[in-house]
Image (cartoon, rainbow, N blue to C red):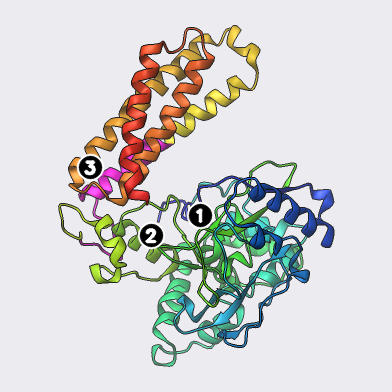
Amino acid sequence: MSEDPFSCFGDDSDDDVQVDIEEINGGKTARLLVEQANERFATTNIIDRSAASKLRKPCTEVMHETSRDLPQALDVPFEPPLYLGPIQVVRESKIGGNRGYVATQDLQPGTLLLVEAPAFQWPEEQIGEELGLVSIQAIFAHENAEMIMHEISFLYPTKDEVEDIIRKKKSADEISLDERLQIKDMMEIMEMQHGGSKELQLVLGMAQANGIHVDEIDIFRILLAMRYNGFGSGVYLHFAMFNHDDDCNCVKFVPDSSDDIKYCSEVRTTKFVSRGSPLSLHYLDPREASHASRRQHLWDQHRFDIGDAMNQVRDDLQEMELVNKVFPPSSRDVLDHDRVTYLVESTLKELEEQLGEIKLGWSLFSANPKIVSMDLKDEIAVLFERGKALEMAADEMCRATESKLENDSHLLLIRCCRLHLDSSEFLLEIGGALSPGLNTSQKMSIMLRFTKSSYMLLPIQT
């Protein structure tokens, strides 16, 4: 399990709610967040004005429709979020985990549902690394350690559930299959990974020094709760109530990473949702992953299996999974590194990382216009050449992927096309800022390839 355990969370937008730390003071903050959110979507025309008018007040003032015909509501054992829209957590056997959010009224696309500050943000040492005890140390060193520990105790698997199953040493006959797979077996894995280690003894000693009463089982449970409920930037208590769906109807906006601002993440609907319908997020990022990759990752990180049968995929999505006109086999436990979709995804990941590196390098230069005239022209020229090579490689990736998969509507083509469009846009930007940059012929060639990728992408996304 060497992958970043948080890379599957969050989503692909960075349009965030920003609030200065000094302004976090209850109702004032909630109103400010909602005003900022409403101001953004008021200019995007993504929802109608009647829907927008219902989102002008923080959660305590939102008037919900009667819930008499909705599933049984559940009390959420957390402090209220900064904003809660027309949704509620219910108990329902047809929802994943038998609980989750549903809409309490018809929701238009773009409806703001939730704004929340993280209960705990990952320490810098944890970002990009496998989930480990460094995050536990950060909690114990936090000034609000007791409050964070209390809040995390209600995340799945809860402290009470672990007490009941692990400490009381219930047999396999006394617990459900999910409890065995998701709690008992995973607690054993946590113990195998960390039990008896010097790092664990250091964490336990740190807890004792800070007056925090925990033992190894408590540490393993916290690790497991963060594994199941963590997002890319930290642990969000109310966000953790959202279930996964490959065809989700909501999106979570990714917080900024600035140190001097406290960022609050939000959830919006991406399509019309009727009253009483479950609300869901996509746990993977990027979302465009093959069925085999999704299956293995969701099992590895969350211990639920989406299965390997074609009939378990929605009818309107099945065609987007076919390779050479066949629904490819998959494994719950391991990835087949020889399958064509894995090779495509590996190449895509490499090219996406290259684009990120080039964009970061250019942002450092473009932040200071005078820098172009300094002794860094060679470095800028290298970035420019890398950008040109990446645009050509991404264009070829689109054509090669379509040919290898023999499916012009495969979901991985969405990611391929998006990579090429992003790299083309970036190349035109950097080429227009440099002198000499791109000549007219080069710009026309890029725009022609851009148009071809757009034409390929359009029918897949509609």
Residue at x 57%, y 67% (from the top left corner):
107
From the image, tell me which residue sits under label 1.
6
Which label sits on residue 163? none
Question: Mark 2 belongs to which amino acid?
Answer: His
Question: Mark 1 belongs to which amino acid?
Answer: Phe
From the image, tell me which residue sits under label 3.
402
**In this image, 461 relative to 33: left or right?**
left
Where is residue 196 shown, x and y percent of the image? 52, 65
Compute the Cα span from label 1 to label 2: 11 Å
Tell me if residue 114 can be seen.
no
Where is residue 10 shown, x and y percent of the image? 53, 54
**In this image, 327 relative to 225: left or right?**
left
Of callouts 3 and 2, which one flags the residue occurring earlier in the amino acid sequence? Answer: 2
Give the residues in magenta.
329-352
| Quadrant containing the N terminus in the rendered view | bottom left
Compute the Cα span from label 1 to label 3: 30 Å
Neighbours of disc 1 within 10 Å: few (<14), some (14-19), many (20+):
many
Of callouts 1 and 2, which one flags the residue occurring earlier in the amino acid sequence? Answer: 1
Of callouts 1 and 3, which one flags the residue occurring earlier in the amino acid sequence? Answer: 1
- Return the residue nearer the eye: 94 or 40: 40
Query: Which is in the foreground here, disc 1 or disc 3?
Result: 3
Question: Mark 3 belongs to which amino acid?
Answer: Glu
Which label sits on residue 297? 2
